Image (spheres, rainbow, N blue to C red):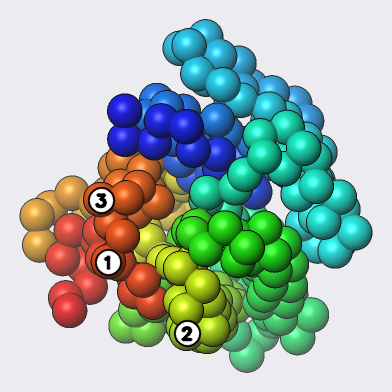
Amino acid sequence: MLLQGKTAVVYGGGGAVGGAIARAFARYGATVHLAGRTERTLRAVADDIEAAGGAAHVDVVDALDGQSVDAHMERVVRRDGRLDASVNVISDQDVQGTPMVEMDVEDYLRPVATAVRSKFLTARAAARVMVPRRQGVILYFGGRFDWTVARKLSVGGIGVTFDAVESMRRQLAGELGRHGIRVVTLHTGGLPETIPADYPGRDEIVELLNGNTLTGQAATLRDVGEMAAFAVSDLARTVSGASINMSAGAAVD
């Protein structure tokens, strides 16, 4: 299978996006280590994976704490002896729907600080394992932010967050490439499935996300999982320092 014999860590593996990626990795043969702060949601994803015949481990990890991240990585290596892919889809609860000039500065900056800190810590832990083996993939999720959306929606600090992570991705790809490590982002342009049914204005947001595409339908969670599996596989060995555009044309390259 595509990922047979590989080991992957998915930070935020109990969430919608992380769960979709973890299930796809396991479906293609990888052993998946689900990491996050809520054991209940992580276990639910692990149960799905195991019920389908896959291999999954659950670990409560605070990705904002360097000691917690490093200790977890040591456990992963003790279990499997290797690390082939590290995926971080952890995000803080962003304050959206409020105009930027009416926000508290702490609310605006919180998702930026959370994303940058957690992705730095998890990438550092992964790289320390991958560099000696001269192989591995660090995968992010988000991509560049389409600022025209701000004309219709108040998006809080999410746009700055995306741009900060993309800058980190470019730097990591440049530094780690000589060690055989690839760094990639998946860019969807928005996932209607992840918007809660009771979210204010949900229907309008879903219509906007689908309407912005060239095909009339935005990416699904299953699409994300499939693309993530491809991105960390050997089939994508020449893809690094790049954002894989799976926005269905919402962002035209």
Q: Does residue 91 appear in the picture of this structure?
A: no
Q: Residues within 10 Å of mark 1 (few under 14, many from 20)?
A: few
**Residue 96 position (above or below residue 88):** below
Return the residue at label 3.
Answer: 235
Residue at screen point 52% across, 9% down: 51
**Residue 138 position (above or below residue 61):** below
Q: Are marks 2 and 3 in contact (CB under 8 Å)?
A: no
Question: Under tag 3, what secondary structure?
Answer: helix
Residue at screen point 60% across, 66% down: 131
- Which of the marked residues, 2 or 3, is nearer the chain's N terminus? 2
Q: Give x and y (percent) for residue 135.
A: 49, 59
Q: How much space separates mark 3 and mark 1, taking CA atoms?
A: 8 Å
Please indicate whether residue 213 sits to the left or right of residue 100 in the image. left
Q: Give x and y (percent) for residue 198.
A: 53, 41
Q: Residues within 10 Å of mark 2 (few under 14, many from 20)?
A: some
In this view, the residue in front, 99 or 227, is 227
Question: Under tag 1, what secondary structure?
Answer: loop
Badge 3 amino acid:
Leu
Numbered circle sitting on residue 238: 1
Q: How much space separates mark 2 and mark 1, taking CA atoms?
A: 14 Å
Numbered circle sitting on residue 174: 2
Residue at screen point 37% across, 61% down: 186
Badge 1 amino acid:
Thr
Question: Under tag 2, what secondary structure?
Answer: helix
Numbered circle sitting on residue 41: none
In this view, the residue in front, 115 or 82, is 82
Q: Give x and y (percent) for residue 159.
A: 50, 78
